[in-house]
Amino acid sequence: MSLRYFVLRRRPALTALAALGLLAGSPAPAAAQAGVLNIYSARHYQTDEALYANFSKATGIKINRLDGKEEELVERIRNEASASPADLLITVDAARLEVADSLGLFQPVKSRLLDERIPAALRTPNWSAFSTRARVIVFNKAALKREQVQSYADLATPALKGQVCMRSGAHPYNLSLGAAVIAHEGEAKAEAWARGMVANFARSPKGGDTDQIKSVAAGECGVTVSNTYYLVRMMRSNKPEDQQAMAAVGVVWPNQSSWGTHINISGAGVLKHAPNRDAAVRFMEYLAGDEAQAYFANGNNEWPVVKGSVAANPALAALGSFKSDTLPIGELAKTTVLAQKVFDRAGWK
């Protein structure tokens, strides 16, 4: 996966980071500061503000945060090297975490609490998931029958020619799904699947998951795939157009008779040169706690990774239960490079 460098979007809260040398850079290793945690985050959810505020209130540790796109943050960390003030990288999708890990940006974290609370399939020695989302099939109820789209493989059948809308094949959400198909079906079948979907495209890939849902609802195409938290966000919306869109579509948990619905994650890792390592580990443990886990469900429509966490999100609950893929997410993430090659050969741009 290529790394590109972008101009960062800064928030007013980042002024404290300038004093640390974050914005100007420094050849010397960043110094630790008592009661401080510096986070580079690619989670662009306004609802996460409560997580940071609650952690600071409970611990007295001040959080300085730099928000940006995944590639720009990874490239920045590489360029800063041992001078980086960043303690923690937070991002969405296991593939992105694996890119950072493969570049040697993380350090191992040993925590009994993380080992006890986070399932082994959702963590690696160097990074951990703290929330999950599922990649489901969304179909237009007036155009297709539920029985026609029961699996990811169904999206490649000739019967759906001209019916499939998708976002870019280069997006990590789809690369992770492709990696799962490769792991379960093999590279050759995964390529045949990708070629079948490309042949069924109603239009060239464009937009994000929400755009795909709206296109299906409007009848521009008959079916797509989407991460669940986009769906639940629209289900909880008071906007008439969102309510009308959700009334027009149905949702299918794919592959319930085989390997289960693909899931992906939001996660974090402690950076190799973290000057405030103890604070970073403490924040990781906070994210695995009951308060934060409930908040991922209630605040951002994601599933907690910790079993038994209590959530009060009726829209999320309305989706029901499902059989999920149990492949270790860390191993799956390593296959995304091959998935990109498969998609390129299939013409899924």
Image: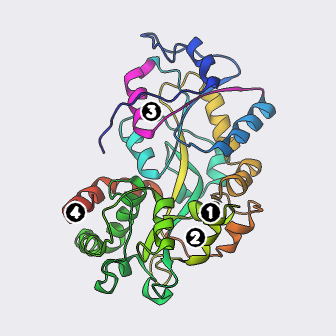
Q: Considering depth in this image, is 235 or 193 the residue closer to the camera?
A: 235
Q: Considering depth in this image, is 199 or 174 the residue closer to the camera?
A: 199
Q: CA distance from mark 2 to mark 3?
A: 35 Å
Magenta stretch: includes residue 177: no
Q: Is residue 130 left or right of residue 62?
A: left
Q: Earlier in the sequence, mark 2 or mark 3?
A: 3
Instruction: Identify whether 169 is placed above or below 43.
Output: below
Q: Residue at x 44, y 82 (%)?
A: 149
Instruction: Report which quarter residue 243 is drawn in.
Output: bottom right
Q: Residue at x 19, y 62 (%)?
A: 345
Q: CA distance from mark 4 to mark 1?
A: 31 Å
Q: Earlier in the sequence, mark 2 or mark 4?
A: 2
Q: Give the label, 4 or 1, closer to the camera.
A: 1
Q: CA distance from mark 2 to mark 4?
A: 30 Å
SS of the residue at dot 3? Answer: helix
Under mark 1, the amino acid is: Met
Q: Give the label, 3 or 1, closer to the camera.
A: 1
Q: Considering depth in this image, is 241 or 280 the residue closer to the camera?
A: 241
* Residue 88 x %, y %: 55, 33
SS of the residue at dot 4? Answer: loop
**Residue range (magenta):** 60-82
Check disc 3 and report the residue beneath it: 73
Check disc 4 and report the residue beneath it: 347
Q: Residue at x 22, y 63 (%)?
A: 347
Check disc 1 and report the residue beneath it: 234
* Residue 225 x %, y %: 45, 68
Q: CA distance from mark 3 to mark 1?
A: 29 Å
